[in-house]
Image (cartoon, grey):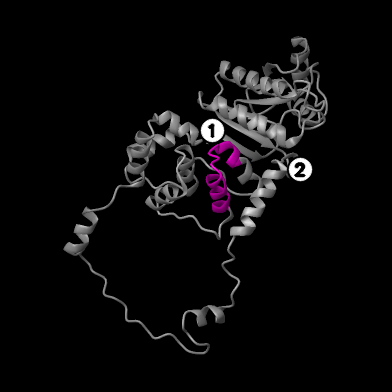
Amino acid sequence: MPLQIVRNDITTMKVDAIVNAANSSLLGGGGVDGCIHRAAGPELLAACRALGGCRTGSAKCTKAYKLPCKYVIHAVGPVWQGGNHGERALLVSCYRTALALAKEKRCKTLAFPLISSGIYGYPKDQALKVAVDTIGEFLLQNEMMVYLVIFDRAAYQISGKLFADITAYIDDHYVQTHTDSPEERFRRQGILAGATAPAMAPAPFPTVPSSALRDALARMDESFSEMLLRKIDERGMTDAECYKKANIDRKLFSKIRSDRLYKPSKPTVIAFAIALELSLPETEDLLRKAGFALSHANRFDIIVEFFIQHGNYNIFEINEALFAFDQNLLGG
């Protein structure tokens, strides 16, 4: 998918470029900056020294040396001073400049840390929203695979209110499916404890499809692919607008378009429902075309339902929440 949030060590990412959360001197420091310099070797420091520093909100590029990527883009984020000193605009500029440099270098894959969220003190939930919104805006106009690399759970936070709202929604809707004992389930089905269910004779298996079955197969309803393409047309969207809003790779969309019987994953189906801004019943219809359904025994489904019910179709924000609750992300 074009934007993916992952837990990893950014110095091990095998991408075209990684972004370093640098200071304005570009001469190394603590946190991510120090880790990148140690992994790249002394040549990186020499290259940075030749750049003569970098202003806050901007970025500069060097080779990656011993790192498993081609380039390091050194982005200088703002120090948090309470939020009233242009910090957000500087952080947005930081991401935009880094993305522009990656595009200039013809990078197809790029990995970011959560800039300014460490020793610079930018609140992690706000830093995350800036990162996701700015990268997402770029990806609506450009083809690139971007990773937002989170080193550990402590380095990642969605807003406390959103987390609380989703938790409450899960608590209100989550259904435990295995709370009954086997005996209770048997009683519910009308089978008494100790009794055995009557044996059922196996139905004969037809070796040749009957004419009725052949007729039924010939009258198959529209497929997932056909419904998806129809809804894209009904919404007046282009293919590119749809798959980018769905956080779907262009190659995957091409497969779906060319194969009327393509079988997508459940996250892929929901991603298209979000891109098309379908209502909950419309989302359920699209899921049925691919053989899926929403369930209140599944946290992933409840979180998706929460966003649809609240009219929030920003797939990157939905993925922030899914990641926070250890669920699969939307896209493909």
Magenta-drawn stretch contains 302: yes
**Which label number is shown at residue 102?**
none
Mark 1 / mark 2, whichever is N-terminal: 1
Q: Residues within 10 Å of mark 1 (few under 14, many from 20)?
A: many
Mark 2 burial class by Cα count in 10 Å: few <14, some 14-19, many 20+: few
Q: Image height check: is 68 above or below 212?
A: above
* Residue shown at 35% from the left, 82% from the top: 200
Q: Position of residue 329 (x, y in %)?
A: 56, 44
| The disc label shown at residue 2, or none | 1
Looking at the image, can residue 64 be seen?
Answer: no
Q: In what element is the residue under mark 1?
A: loop
Q: In the rendered structure, which segment of residues is drawn in magenta?
A: 300-319
Depicted 50 relative to depicted 197: above or below = above
Q: Is residue 273 above or below residue 184?
A: above
Which numbered circle lies on residue 154? 2
Name the amino acid type tagged 2.
Answer: Ala
**Mark 1 vs mark 2, CA separation in Å:** 24 Å
Residue drawn at x 68%, y 39% is: 8
Front-most of residues 254 and 84: 84
Which image quadrant is residue 208 in? Answer: bottom left
